[in-house]
Amino acid sequence: MARFCNICNRSFPTQRGFQAHCTSHHRHPKPKPLPRVTQYHPLLSARPCNAEGEYLEDMDAPPPPRDIREGFDPFPNRPSFEVGELLYEKMAASKGDLEQLFRILHAQKVLDGHNAEDDTFFSSHQHLLDTIDAIPCGDSEWTTFVIRYAGPIPPNAPKWQKESYVVHAHNSRTVVENMASNPDFDGSWNTRPYREFDEHGTRIYSNLLSAHWSWKQADLIAQDPETHGAMFVPLCIAADKTTASVATGNQEFHPVYLMAGNVTNEMRRAHRDAVVPVAFLPIPKAEAEYANSTDFRLFKKQVYHLALRLLLDPLRPGMTTPQVLRCPDGHFRRSIFGIGPVIADYPEQVYLSGIVQGWCPKCQALPDELDSVGVSRSRAHTCELWETYMFDPGTLWDSFGIVNDVTPFTYHFPRADIHELLTPDLLHQLIKGTFKDHLVDWVVTYIRLNAATEREANQILDDIDRRIAASPAFPGLRRFPQGRNFKQWTGNDSKALMKVFLPALSGYVPDAMIQCLAAFFDFAYLARRPSHNTTSLDAMDAALARFRQLRVIFVETGVRPDGFSLPRQHALLHYTRMIKLFGSPNGVCTSISESKHIAAVKRPWRASSRHKPLLQILIRNTRLSKLAAFRVELGRCGLLHGDIVSHALHQQNLEEEHFMEEQDIADAHGPHGRVSTIAQDLQLPGLHALIRRFLREQLYPGVDDPDEVVPLDICPWVPHSLHVGVHRVAKATFFAPSEFCGSGGMHSEAIRCTPQWRQEGPRYDTVFVQLSDDPGMHGMGVARVRGFLSFTYDFVLYQCALVEWFEIVGDEPDPVMGMWVVEPDIQNGERAISLISIDSIVRSCHLIGVYGHTRIPNDFCFSDTLDAFRRYYVNPYADYHINELLK
């Protein structure tokens, strides 16, 4: 159901998304922001103007009012709108299912004695579609243009030379106007390039307009005095071919997405309307005889670049002459467009940059010398090479890796250099590429090369899989019941495997190999941070240097006898420079376009008849954009306040909506009763004494030595009739320091302690407990939660956690694994246990057994892991917040 946040003026298509937003943004107080110094570009200052482009004299003048809608037309009311949105967008119900549903509802109305002529929401499937088509906002029609082979076509020419290739596209100018005027982006739209510094004067890189490239573009634009006072609008482009189904005719599609670089990274990753499908490119096909011919391969690239150029042509006048746009805050501003970062995987980057496969699109390092950075490529240098070797294309190909007959589309637009604009690709270069396709495969190869027999190699790999499957549950952690042995890998699979892979290798590969992977993981987790500064970039360079130094182990062991001239690993050398140019990579990564494929291509394809599905996909995308724009409009006009039931009650003047404040501790069917009863349920005879000592600590903090056992006779007396509640889940809300932007770094997660979790055995999560103000593990302890308790003493409600303690082994992390090690804290032959305030819990932590040379039994259950091993690694890769906390 649609919901609207009146504080942020932002709509949410689902109740779950709305609640998550309220929890992370509005429920908990955020830490006081650290001092920041922000410098804005002095000339491209984004001054407000009127609709005719005349600057306003009063800089503080309010924006012109937008029209206020009073109803839901073309829908009769809010329930009809939400039903239509649910059926068409969320459920993607088929025509037959919808017709049956409407007939069932109609029949029920007849049985209830209502007028049979009255419609129930919609009379038919077509009635629903007509209503959506009548929505007056969010409309941007699809147009088509045709590209044909322009060379001589002999009578016996191959079929591909005679075909017409159709490009389906929106008007890119209209798409940008709709995006810029979307009030949902108010507060998440940067109008000016800026430089941000922390209290130490260190530069911070986060959003696109905070980085070097935007400032440099603004300097170039500002050379024309007519642009002074304008707003710079960089347009990010993502091109990514996708397959909807291999089984049904291998149906491929090539969508192009457009994004305004002014939108913050957080909003771009979270909001579906910040990434708009703007075109579907043709995919030329040829018979097997011609598929690999030079002419056909060249033609495919020429079609690709011509289509992109024609797609973006409507924006070209606005790249030199300011155009008036309405912005999310309601103001009009004169705007200058620019081709922004281009998001693509390596095969697409080869097409985009016009280089030879195997070369780097960013520099001129030779294909067999990709272990180092070469001279940077640039538009100007490539043009000089074209002129110099105009009649010697072989030298261009062999010596510089340039395809002479391909002109990148960016060459037709001012200030656009495709070699500079290609962005880091966390998904394909880092996660799927270096980790999954390289390191995981190399480890498997090493094991097979060094095992005595193939059977022994398989036994080792099976044990590694069982170790991976034995990882304890953790909030947001995907489990691998069969280990890493599955066929269809997704980006999320690879990211999840990175979290638990390293400890599983213990005892089976050399220490240097584990250190190599640990160095790569450190680099990968640093790269995924939402904001960067000089410290994090230096740490990235250091981690990458360690990885490159240690990966020689794969050469020495015979896994990589030919070295490491690999384009995707070579790309890592450009990361820190690219972060300084474009901000955090998670805002310009192919994972954004990959996730958009689901809503823009794959779901519409599944809802199609499969016969010529592209036109059906286009129509469905148009209707989805209308529904999304209408939801924003209704929210802006205050028509989506509250949920659907409270809205209906309010319309009938029956009852107002009431919200209950969410508690830190939730009642998840735990027992309640007297202390003695709860002690029996928890099998903890000393609970009464633990409560008394806990109260002593709460009432007299800092009085007692934490390492000494406090005598009971000096602790507050608690009657045995004290009523105690036991709870199975609590919510921890914590701050991630690296998130200098966005929601302020606030995150929440559920910590569970239950004797039965999803019919898979008990689950008692482990947590970090704050013990002092020292950084990282030097100021924290590790404990396992056995229950959350609440009770009232002297009219004060106390909420606490019953925990078993772990003791940290040593003063530093393990030198090989790079992880802290803990072991169960045993006192007098029993586990050390105590009650702690829930306020001292920092967040969940993830422990993985120190396997050593122990092989895991076939029937071992992951729920037993925290009871089965003598020592445990504190996993710094469970998520990047923990990585930052520990590293």
Image: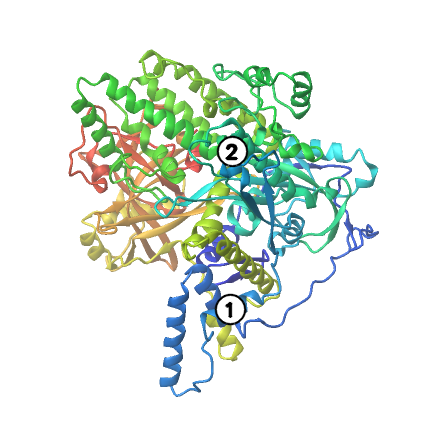
Task: Name above or below for residue 787 compared with residue 878.
Answer: below
Q: CA distance from mark 2 to mark 1?
A: 40 Å
Q: Quadrant of the C terminus?
A: top left
What residue is rendered at 29% in x and 21% in y?
Answer: 445
Q: Which of the pair 691/151 is nearer the observer?
A: 151
The image quadrant of residue 101 is bottom left
Outermost residue toward the front? 155
Task: Name above or below for residue 226 compared with residue 569.
Answer: below
Q: Which residue is mark 1?
A: 81
Q: Which residue is mark 2?
A: 348
Q: Number of labelled discs?
A: 2
Q: Which of the pair 834/105 is nearer the observer?
A: 105
Q: Position of residue 554 (x, y in %)?
A: 35, 16
**Helix or strand or loop: what does disc 1 sit on?**
helix
Q: Position of residue 395 (x, y in %)?
A: 59, 15
Q: Which of the pair 128/474 is nearer the observer?
A: 128
Q: Is residue 657 visible?
A: no
What residue is rendered at 76% in x and 43% in y?
Answer: 230
The image quadrant of residue 815 is top left
**Helix or strand or loop: what does disc 2 sit on?**
helix
Q: Residues within 10 Å of mark 1 (few under 14, many from 20)?
A: many
Q: Position of residue 808 (x, y in %)?
A: 32, 29
Q: Is residue 235 left or right of residue 497?
A: right
